Amino acid sequence: MRTELYALKTEFLTRLGYGQTGRWGERIATLHIQRTGAFVLSRNWLAGKLEADIIAIEKRTLVVVEVKTRNESFMHTYPARHAVTTEKTARLSALARAFMRQNSPLCRRLGVKNYRLDTLEVYYRRTYLKRHHAQSVWWHKSYVSST
């Protein structure tokens, strides 16, 4: 996994153009989430107009991750996590419920009854990158219905 992270960093430094930074950050975030022991189910999952950057399972909890990629110069003046507003949290919560409804057999089989919303910030500079994973931005227990 370390070599894959190095390859992504090299790709960013050499070839990444405008508008691709977010997708690159999502790939870095996916690697980070896999390193923490979570199983990534989907990337860029859509439900109507809603999109989840990453959906994963960690210890029988569905984790919906919002990834924010920023230049390191903004890290202290406007942290990326501030871009996840109450409105965005409500949309991500609705998206988590929609995922659990649409994939209820899978969720039951894996024993998933809760969901959690995380933000993962990826800060980059030409010479290095940093990650900050804020877990449990919002937590909901026992959502899966018996129907």
Image: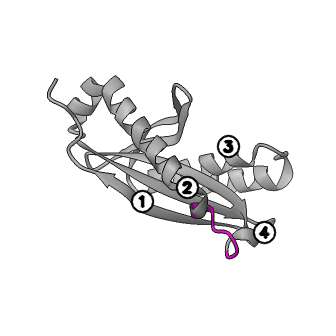
- For image coordinates 77% across by 52% down, the residue present is 12
Q: Position of residue 73 (x, y in %)?
A: 76, 71
Q: CA distance from mark 3 to mark 2?
A: 17 Å
Q: CA distance from mark 4 to mark 1?
A: 30 Å
- For image coordinates 62% across by 62% down, the residue present is 80
Q: Amino acid at mark 1?
A: Val
Residue 99 inside the magenta-drawn segment: no
User: Considering only order in the chain, which callout, 2 or 3, is on the residue closer to the N terminus?
Assistant: 3
Residue 23 figure quarter? top right
Q: Amino acid at mark 2?
A: Val
Residue matched to label 2: 84
- Cβ atoms at labels 2 and 1 below 8 Å apart: yes
How many badges with numbers are in the image? 4
Q: CA distance from mark 3 to mark 1?
A: 22 Å
130 sits left or right of 104 in the view: right
Q: Residues within 10 Å of mark 3 (few under 14, many from 20)?
A: some
Tell me the element at label 2: loop
Q: Amino acid at mark 3?
A: Arg
99 sits left or right of 53 in the view: left
Q: Does residue 45 lie above or below 72 as drawn?
A: above
Q: Which one is in front in this view, the residue at disc 3 or the one at disc 2?
A: 2
Residue matched to label 3: 23
Q: Residues within 10 Å of mark 4 (few under 14, many from 20)?
A: few
Q: In front: 6, or 117?
A: 117
Residue matched to label 4: 127
Give the magenta range: 76-81
Q: CA distance from mark 2 to mark 1?
A: 10 Å
Q: CA distance from mark 2 to mark 4?
A: 27 Å
Residue matched to label 1: 137
- Cβ atoms at labels 3 and 1 below 8 Å apart: no
Q: Does residue 133 lie above or below 3 as drawn?
A: below
